[in-house]
Image: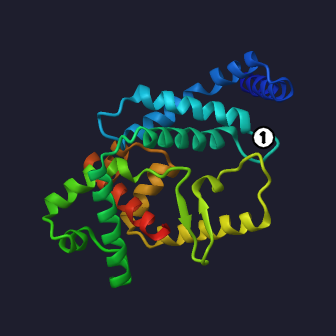
Amino acid sequence: MTLQRDQERVAQLWQDYKKTQDVQVRDALIDEYISLVKYVAGRMAINLPNSVELDDLESLGFFGLLDAIEKFDETRNIKFETYASTRIRGAIIDGLRAMDWVPRSTRSKARTLENQIYELTNELGRNPSDEEVAAALELTPERYYEMLDEVRGATLFSLDETIVTEKAGQSLKMSDLVVDQDQPTTEQRLLQQELLEELATAISQLSEREQLVLSLYYHDELTLKEIGHILEVSESRVSQIHTKAILTLQGKLQ
């Protein structure tokens, strides 16, 4: 009964805010969802260097929450938490990029890894193993895994990242996959569907372990430490598997 009353209270807040744009009602909505900012920022911090402060991530994410509250259409068939999480994540990533927090050398290493994985995939007709990527880069296994650790923060998608589809001359941004105020055109829906199909195909070509890590992290929302317990490997190794999987997907989708 308490849960129902709480849902009714939140629904009334949304109704009042969309009608009045009252600042006090907006602040009440912020209080309702501020924990979502802390949650998203905390999960993202796992994949970032220790030099990045959690408080800074939460501050950036707060602006994403504000944007989500302003643009959310409660009549759409989507939960606000789902919509806002994407906006919060995008605001954090865009804020980090604006601060140019990733050293140029780190971005260069990430691009080198991504390109090498992509070239080997085309050459072998399958996704290469860690050993094959290390050999192609003329690195020892130890140095290769160190390189994966170094670039982990550079593998974050931006909502403004452009992704090219297989059809010549057509491209999308990651933000195009987010439900927004404007009704998407038929062409936009077709492009969205095409990108989702390409992404699904790319994921299906990853190794079973890489697919499992992505599923446990993004779908089941487990931490890297929890995934490590399941796979019986270290948290660092899970991070390396995650980074290689993301680099592989980025190479296929760019």
In percent of width and height, residue 121 lies at 36, 77
Image spot of residue 179 (x, y percent):
70, 50
Instruction: Give the answer, above or below, for where 37 lies relative to 235.
Output: above
* Percent position of residue 77, x then y: 77, 48
Residue in front for this viewpoint, 129 or 184 = 184
Question: Relative to residue 21, is residue 49 drawn left or right?
Answer: left
Place residue 222 in its image quadrant: top left
Label 1: which secondary element: loop
State left or right for residue 120 relative to residue 94.
left
Say which residue appears at 60% left-offset and 41% top-offset: 87
- Say which amino acid is labelled 1: Asp
Where residue 140 sits, quadrant-wise, is bottom left
Q: Quadrant of residue 165?
A: bottom right
Count of numbered circles in the view: 1
| Mark 1 lies on residue | 73
Q: Residue at x 70, y 32 (%)?
A: 69
Front residue of 200 and 114: 114
